[in-house]
Amino acid sequence: MGERDALHLKNLPRHVAIIMDGNGRWAQGKGLPRTMGHKKGMDSIREIVTISSNYGIKGLTLYAFSTENWRRPREEVDFLMSLPRIYLKKELPQLMRNNVKLYFSGRLHGLPPEIQDILREAASATENNKGLFLNIAINYGGRAEITDAAAKIAQLVREEKLEPGDITEDIVAAHMYTANLGDPDLLIRTGGEARLSNFLLWQAAYAELYFTPVLWPDFGKEEYDRALFAYSSRERRFGQLSRELGD
Ligand code: IPE
Ligand code: IPE
Ligand code: MG
């Protein structure tokens, strides 16, 4: 990409979502324990958050821990659970300087209580910031999210606040964790796999998908710009015919 960067692109995505995959393989490839890949992955988070802020991207959703990741060995899960504290302690001042508003989505009540406290404090410290909306998906599962939305809507019906026949897509969307953020325009997955792994199943309906073999700890400005350039050249049709779009 040389001197150029994606800042001057006409159509930058409004909301970018990233499946940050490949930390374990990055470490294993260097003969290190997998946890060192997760640690290094935090540097990529810092860089991508800063660039997104500088580019004026409105929302960034990062998949940090899935509802399925509890199936990993205990030591790895414990290490991953220690990262929010480390990340926020180190990064919160910079996030404040960059006017970033933090938000956490997922089954937060399923996290250890001390982590819930840390996340709540960080979110409230940044709640008046008006810059990048940084949504960290933690203990997140797309099916869990849709299931939770169904339960909330069922409750409204039981309370006679809503008729089943009045349930629209907008009402379902309003009960998703991302109700205040909207759908991602661009969904990036690092680490070479071409699957969603239960990420944003509802919201990604019309996202442009971008898969790269680059492992998350190696994902920096050059690769991010590449993804943003690719996005800028895609034509989003939303079911219409190509020629109808310009009309
Ligand atoms: C992504 O990296 C981080 C989390 C899932 C928490 P992985 O740990 O999945 O790395 P690989 O895919 O095993 O290389
Ligand atoms: C997806 O990566 C979850 C996160 C990046 C947090 P995984 O490594 O858990 O996905 P699978 O297991 O390869 O599908
Ligand atoms: Mg993985």
Image (cartoon, helix red, strand yellow):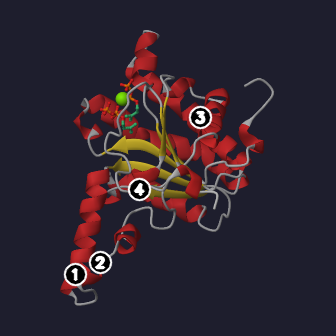
Q: Residue at x 50, y 28 (%)?
A: 216
| Of callouts 3 and 4, the N-terminal one | 4
Residues marked 1 and 2 touching at CB (< 8 Å): yes
| Of callouts 2 and 3, the N-terminal one | 2
Q: Quadrant of residue 165?
A: bottom left
Q: Position of residue 129 (x, y in %)?
A: 66, 63
Identify the secondary structure beneath mark 3: helix
Residues marked 1 and 3 touching at CB (< 8 Å): no
| Amino acid found under the numbered disc labelled 4 | Gln
Give the residue pinned by disc 2.
167
Image region (quadrant) for ligand 1: top left
**How many discs appear?**
4
| Amino acid found under the numbered disc labelled 1 | Pro
Identify the secondary structure beneath mark 4: helix
For label 4, the crowd category at 10 Å Cα-Cα, with few meaning under 14, some 14 to 19 and many 20 or more, is some
Give the residue pinned by disc 1.
164
| Of callouts 4 and 2, the N-terminal one | 2
Seen as rendered, the residue at the extreme top is: 31
For label 2, the crowd category at 10 Å Cα-Cα, with few meaning under 14, some 14 to 19 and many 20 or more, is few
